[in-house]
Image (cartoon, helix red, strand yellow):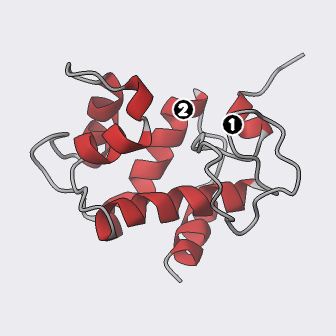
């Protein structure tokens, strides 16, 4: 029997933690003590996209290092983070020195983050595109 990673079980491909924000598509019943549960993967991706967009707009975080430092803060240390390097490499930018162009990089950034978080990439680029478009509304 194949057991899916927790994020996929919860329709939360980015492993967003439950934080009290009433996201569109947040499931009425939360099935995990830490990670949010969504009605479907689209809504989990939408919340992830909105979170990353807000890191730039509201919090002034523009590098992979600072964005992922907030996103996965419990895993951050003062040393080089393989998560940062992996995502930045996928974007073709330096993790600490180059700014993330949210319009250009959000799709590949999210896809790589999900691949790292879940150990696989089970979703189409089209589903991400739809979630990102909805997050920007």
Say which of 55 and 12 sits in front: 55
Q: How many marks?
A: 2
Residue 112 located left or right of residue 4: left
Residue 23, horizontal then vertical, whole percent: 67, 65
Q: Is residue 125 visible in the rendered structure shown here?
A: no
Residue 124 falls in which quadrant of the image? bottom right
- How crowded pointer 1 is (Cα within 10 Å; few <14, some 14-19, many 20+) is rated as many
User: What element does badge 1 sit on?
Assistant: helix
Q: Are marks 2 and 1 in contact (CB under 8 Å)?
A: yes
Residue holding disc 1: 7
Q: Is residue 114 visible in the rendered structure shown here?
A: yes
Residue found at the very far bottom of the displayed protein: 137
Q: Residue at x 84, y 39 (%)?
A: 31
Residue found at the very far left of the displayed protein: 97
Residue 10 located left or right of residue 71: right
Residue 6 located left or right of residue 52: right
Residue 118 higher or lower than 39, as above or below:
above
Q: Residue at x 25, y 56 (%)?
A: 61
Instruction: Tell me the tag on residue 33.
Output: none
Q: Residue at x 52, y 35 (%)?
A: 115
User: What element does badge 2 sit on?
Assistant: helix
Residue 55 falls in which quadrant of the image? bottom left
Q: Residue at x 28, y 24 (%)?
A: 81
Residue 39, horizontal then vertical, whole percent: 82, 57
Earlier in the chain: of badge 2 and badge 1, it is 1
Say which of 96 and 124 sits in front: 96
Residue 13 higher or lower than 127, as above or below:
above
Residue 54 falls in which quadrant of the image? bottom left
User: Where, quadrant-wise, is the N terminus in this rendering?
Assistant: top right
Residue holding disc 2: 117
Distance between mark 2 and mark 1 Cα atoms: 8 Å
Residue 112 higher or lower than 129, as above or below:
above
């Amino acid at each position: 029997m194949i057991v899916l990673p927790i994020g996929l079980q919860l329709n939360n491909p980015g492993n967003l933690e439950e934080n009290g924000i009433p996201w569109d598509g947040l499931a009425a019943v939360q099935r995990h003590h830490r990670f949010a549960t969504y009605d479907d993967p689209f809504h989990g991706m939408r919340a992830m996209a909105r979170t990353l967009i807000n890191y730039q707009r509201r919090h002034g975080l523009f590098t992979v290092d600072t964005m992922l430092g907030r996103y996965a803060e419990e895993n951050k240390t003062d040393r080089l983070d393989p998560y940062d390097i992996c995502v930045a490499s996928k974007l073709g930018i330096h993790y600490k020195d180059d700014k993330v162009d949210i319009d250009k990089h959000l799709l590949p950034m999210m896809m790589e983050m999900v691949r790292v978080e879940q150990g696989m990439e089970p979703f189409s680029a089209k589903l991400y595109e739809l979630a990102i478009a909805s997050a920007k509304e």
